[in-house]
Amino acid sequence: ERGRERRAIGIAEESMFDDLEPWNDFESRDLQDCPQWERSIPNLEPFVSAVANRITGPGWVEEARGLVECTESRFAGSPGVREAERYLEKTMSEIGLEVFRHETGCLIKENGKRHYFQGGETSFEVVNIIGSLPGNQAEEGVVVVGAHFDSRNHLLSSEGKAPGADDNASGVAAVLQTARIAKEVSDQCGGLPYTMHFLAFGGEEVGLVGSERYVAEYVSKLGDKFKGAIILDQIGFKQPSHTDARIVFETVKTTTQDVSKQILSMIRSLGSGAKALAQDNVDLWCNWFGVGSDHMPFLEKNYPSVLLIARDYLSNEGKHSCYDTMEKLDGRQGALISLPKPLP
């Protein structure tokens, strides 16, 4: 089913990083024809620099911990999902975002199967939580920073614990950290020229449900005003033997020329920012053969999107189990990816 195979354990997942391209090789190409995705905004840089220094590994870890500890399982169709939704709504509201519940109309049964008709008492609707930071120039469009908040265990059911620390409280923590900084920057510089949607997607583990419906119901109406989506998934695990953070930018090249240029420019901007912030203590890679996670519904409809994922995530023995716990997260790596540089 359309590039959802990352969520199943199999050969496709084990070989997905076979053809990675080092980011330095990509960045050294002639990209003069690519538009700068990040906009030059007067006086923005000092504010970004001022607040970026406040993001620490321990702070990012505590952001992830808040989601993990709000409920034992966030598997789609479990009662814990509602607890997670309330936690995210409260947190985004405290940040100062305009918060919306996007009810997708897709119901999930207790066994994780989805259907689009009214079910019985054991059916739960997939919901996205949207934190909006309105821009001061509506015509400039919308930028998305998103991550799925649901989790799963080896049972692929609502039974048992599914803490989902790396998959994907790590990504949600990055979204929330970026939202805090963007809100402060916006307040201090009189507003950003574009609207930002900070998204917690539901139902990723059962088929990219939340992101698919968001693209269908929101992005499709924006058209050219949609500027791009940065998706974060499983960014917190790093093998202890690796001293540098290891990040993969994942997307696809099979889009139109204009969208491809936007994607290339996004990756160049994000990579340059990560290198600067980490003082080059980071290994960056590009994967041009995207297979799963919430960037795919955007790409499949020809909207620019890039996934950030840790290169080491496949080595996490707790992945998709009750052992995906907080002590496996690397705070420095998570904080690095959470930093908002460069804002578009």
Image (spheres, helix red, strand yellow):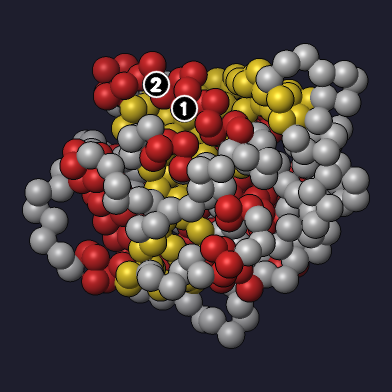
Name the kind of residue labelled 1 in the image: Val
Disc 2: which residue: 220
Labels 1 & 2 near each other (Cβ < 8 A): yes
Task: In this rendered view, identify the residue nearer to me: 298 or 39.
Answer: 298
Instruction: Name the residue rendered at 75%, 66% in the picture.
Output: 318
Reply above or below: 152 against 78: below
Task: In this rendered view, identify the residue nearer to me: 219 or 187.
Answer: 219
Instruction: Name the residue rendered at 71%, 30% in the picture.
Output: 114
Q: In x, y percent, where is residue 260?
A: 24, 45
Residue positioned most to the bottom: 241
* SS at circle 2: helix
Reply above or below: 236 against 269: below
Marker count (numbered): 2
Q: In x, y percent, where is residue 333?
A: 54, 65
The image quadrant of residue 203 is: top right
Nearer the N terminus, badge 1 or badge 2? 1
Instruction: Name the residue rendered at 43%, 53% in the picture.
Output: 290
Q: How crowded is mark 2: few (under 14 residues within 10 Å), some or many (20 or more)?
A: some
Residue 87 horizontal side relative to residue 194, left or right = right
> Would residue 52 be visible to someone looking at this image?
no
> Would residue 113 be visible to someone looking at this image?
yes
* SS at circle 1: helix
The image quadrant of residue 209 is: top right
Name the kind of residue labelled 2 in the image: Ser
The quarter of the picture where the N terminus appears is top right
Which mark identifies residue 215?
1
Reply above or below: 294 against 93: below
Q: In x, y percent, where is residue 208?
A: 59, 38
Marks 1/2: CA–CA distance: 6 Å
Reply above or below: 141 against 255: above
